[in-house]
Image (cartoon, helix red, strand yellow):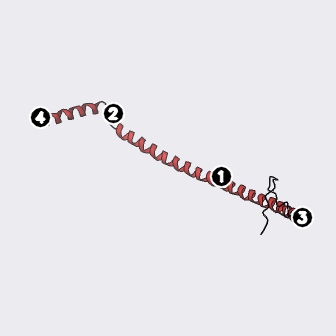
Amino acid sequence: MADNRALQEAEAITFEIDGMFESGVEEEYLERLVSAAEEGTGQSKLLKDALVTELGNILSKLTEHQIEARGMRLETLEHKSPKALQRASRNPSVGLRSQRGRPRKVIPKR
């Protein structure tokens, strides 16, 4: 009996609380929540697509710069290497110099 009475009191409180709100508000609120969630999903997809595109552009530019830098370095080496070899062949005791101009230690062959 005590359980039945507690249940009736809980139902009365529930009806009283429900009476404080307009009917149909729950459906409107849920509709707004669903719309906001769908809009957020769409915006997230657009943002992701934009980021992927931008990252692709950045990586393409980086690759181009690396290829260009490598070509320049190879060109520089092509110009410097013959000069260094010519100097070494003229005076083998001096040996090849590093790019900073410091003499390298020459180790005689046995």
* CA–CA distance in space, label 2 to label 4: 32 Å
- The residue that disc 1 covers is 58
**Mark toward the start of the polypeptide (3 vs 4):** 4
Q: Is residue 44 left or right of residue 73?
A: left
- The residue that disc 4 covers is 2
**What's under tag 4, amino acid-wise?**
Ala
Outermost residue toward the front in this view? 110
Whether 62 is drawn above or below 12: the answer is: below
- The residue that disc 2 covers is 22
- The residue that disc 3 covers is 90
**Mark toward the start of the polypeptide (2 vs 3):** 2
Q: Residue at x 84, y 61 (%)?
A: 84
Q: Residue at x 14, y 34 (%)?
A: 5
* CA–CA distance in space, label 3 to label 4: 114 Å
**Contact check, label 1 and label 3, Cβ < 8 Å:** no
Helix, strand or loop for disc 4 = helix
**What's under tag 1, amino acid-wise?**
Ile
Q: Residue at x 48, y 48 (%)?
A: 41
**Contact check, label 2 and label 4, Cβ < 8 Å:** no
**What's under tag 3, amino acid-wise?**
Arg
**Quick one: label 4, few (<14), some, or many (20+) residues within 10 Å?**
few
**Mark toward the start of the polypeptide (2 vs 4):** 4
